[in-house]
Amino acid sequence: MLAGRRSLYMLCFAAYIGGITALYMADAIAALLKEMLSEIHYFNSLNGDPSLELRYHKRDLCDIFQDLLKHLRSMLQGYVNEEIKILFSEMEFEIYEVYRHRVERRQVLGSIILVNCERLLDIIYGSNTEGEETVVGFDDEMETLLDQLTATSSKQLQVFSIAGMAGLGKTTLARKLYTDPLIDYTFDFRAWICVSQTYIKRDLLLGILGSFITDLTDETYQMSDQQLGEKLYRLLKGRKYLVVLDDIWDSKIWNELRIYFPDDKVGSRVLITSRDIELSSHLQAAKPTHVLRLRTEDESWAIFLKKVFRTGFCPPWLKEHADVIIRKCEGLPLAIVITAGLLKNDFSVHWWLHMSASLHSFMLSDPSQYMDSLALSYSHLPHHLRHCFVFVGVFPEDYDIPVTKLIWLWIAQGFIHETESRILEDVAEDVFQDLIKRSLLMIAKKRADGQIKTCRIHDLLRDLCLKKANEENFSQQVHINPPELLSSEFRYPYEFGELLQKGASLDTERYKRLRILDVESVLIPLFPSDITKLVNLRYLAIQAHDGNPTSSISSLTHLQMLIISSRKNIVVPKTIWAMVNLRHLYIKTGENLIEDPCFVQETDKDSSSSGLASLQTLSQVSPRSCKNIFSATPSLRKLGFCGPLVSSQGEIEFPNIRSLQQLQKLKLLNTIPYGKPTRLLNTMMFPEKLKKLTLSNTCMDWEDMWVISLLSNLEVLKLKFHACIGDTWETSDAEFKQLKILKLKGLNLKQWVCWKENFPGLQRLVVHQCLKLDSIPSDLGKIITLEVIEVQWCSNLAQVSALEIQKEHESEGNFFLKVHASNNH
């Protein structure tokens, strides 16, 4: 303790040297306050023990307090007023009461000292710190953008952009750049104009002119839009200028203003901020958009401390609650700043505990604090996107939403409409990408091929969804559940899970208009027959110990998606072929049978003999039950076989799928190993448009891989768990011309010999759990398209070889190739 005190006194003494600068003094106060609050925390933990130790701590506490007051008074010279006198008096009174053994005063001492110190520092520095904290964590972006804006390498007029969701700090970062001394030195003219969602071109022109000209004349205000533009052009002609267009929602405005910005090859720049991360592609920007990210936990802490505590120190009795609050803000500066404003100047444990327990519900009680900003994102959405966005509110907080599932749910709910040339799934994919680029949804996980696998919605945006759902009676249409009822798993509607688990009958009359029933998170004994009475269902997902659908499932004539998880292999009844609207039959596990369509009895002229013309997904079906069905499923895009796929002669075989002209994705999972290397005879087994192929347990001889290389449209190849067997894969003359993604997982491969010519367009290589592989072929590093090499749970030699490839790239000035090599997931 004494050593620590000596260091503090040295710091305080140093503060007086050189004119007692405010910076050193503030550091001294922060250090003293930190020690005092820690001392109070320890003092309180003694719980009133009238021991010698307690008396010594009281004496120490008072000594530190006197040092703190001395430094505060030194800093406040020239600021003294009645308010400051009262703040000092309150602190002196509280420390005096504690010294007089007023034990009940100890619990509030720390809060009062901290609050009053914060208020005193606010008086010194001013209370407005808004915005500065949201730049925390963006030092790299700041430096990069500053370099780009001031670079002399290009003299042409260039456009740069910053994008991200509401509340990330786009405007603050742009403002920090705009006011940087180097920017001020570099440019002759600077202008800042906020565009916002609804703009008037005339006002924008006047605003830009007003940044350049101190006093606009009445004559200027009487000019037409064209005259204002010409005036701006003449003013900027020959000058080096920077114009910041803040909060652009559409590229249209820049296209309208562009003609008034001359390019005299003097290094002028335009900086744009937007919530649309793809806007730069429509602006002819010089560089890709700087997409701002959510803050890390450490960065969130830095923002929080700057906003709540002038001293930058959180007292120990509040730290636990602060940790919870920071996590709930999820890295969004807007949320952190709003919450900090609610916590500042009230440092009672009771209040912080309340905030940590009910942060979102409290914030919703005054939605004007942040909802107006977030709601702009919603109000700007085209009408066809609004329901899709609001619907995301049905998912629980912090839920990784499978993208495919979300798209299917949108379709089932009727939010997506087919166009003349594009099917529903493709239109829905565009909607999803639109919400991603508007930063209303966040990427959570990506697949090996770089496609988005799951997404998330920030809790504040989810609150917005729920708010809009209530305002527009949307919750009645889609049964959005109250947040407090939602579990960590998706269940929709929520109450159905418990009923099905109990085997209780369903009130089908009440839910007769229900379109979506997803109780996949609840294990039930049998496929429930009651469900077939919900005749308006479009989407049905269940998990049953025995998942065999009843024959009455054909009653669900509107059903589009049927998802089944089962502990047993299931048999899909022949009546399935009467469900002409079915688009996806997704069985998640097992070797399942589907009864032949030829057994369906025709009842009228419009019988099911035409088959499932809209079916696009068929998974986990046994090849033994698929000999005669593909003529009835011409639109299949995704197909998964699970069952015996090797003949008695050791040849890989499966039903003829050559007729499936729309098939893009095929999975082959063999369930009966042959015991020796198998053969793949020719590519005539595969449809022409096949883009993705996954082989599992097929035990194919590596020498037959040249056959797969002949698939002219193959972009993704995944070889999993004994897909191929043998020690060596030598690609020899094989050329995978279109292959972009190659994934090797769970293989016994020892040596891989290949050259860059074998994979001329490879972008991503993923190698997992190949424990015997001695190295990643060095020649792969010469593939100019290669972006990522990922090596996990492999030998150390394989990891080192991958890192060596990266080093070689970097030595040649190529920093684009990223290598992830570790034994951790």
Image: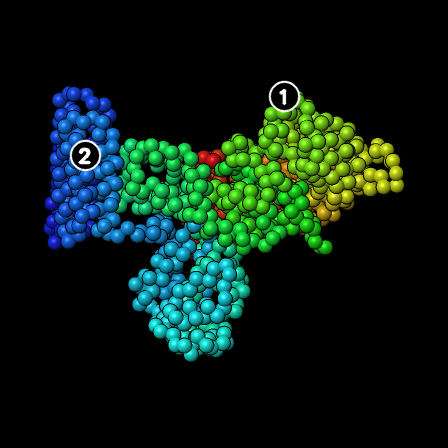
Q: Which mark is residue 94?
A: 2
Measured from the top left, where is residue 675 in percent x and y? 65, 28
- Give residue 593's quadrant in the image: top right
Earlier-in-chain disc, 1 versus 2: 2
Type of amino acid under label 2:
Glu
Q: Compared with residue 433, is residue 232 higher up or lower down, i.e. above or below? A: below
Q: Name the residue under label 1.
A: 502
Crowding at dot 2, Cα within 10 Å, few <14 / some 14-19 / many 20+, comes out as: some
| Type of amino acid at the residue the image marks with label 1 | Lys
Residue 236 numbered mark, or none: none
Q: Is residue 505 left or right of residue 760?
A: right
Foreground residue among 272 and 156: 272
Q: Does residue 638 appear to the left or right of 275 in the view shown?
A: right
- Residue at 36% from the left image edge and 62% from the top image edge: 178
Q: Dot 1, crowdedness within 10 Å: few (<14), some or many (≥20)? A: few
Q: Residue at x 38, y 39 (%)?
A: 326
Q: Which residue is pictured at 74% across the width and 47% down the height?
A: 661
SS category of the residue bearing label 2: helix
Q: Which of marks 1 and 2 is in front?
A: 2
Asked if 528 appears above or below 181 in the picture, the reply is above
Residue in front for this viewpoint, 511 or 436: 511
Q: What is the secondary structure assignment of the residue under circle 1? A: helix
Asked if one can make out residue 680 in the rendered structure from this viewpoint, the answer is no
Quadrant position of the N terminus in the picture: top left
Q: How far apart are the alpha carbons under marks 1 and 2?
A: 61 Å
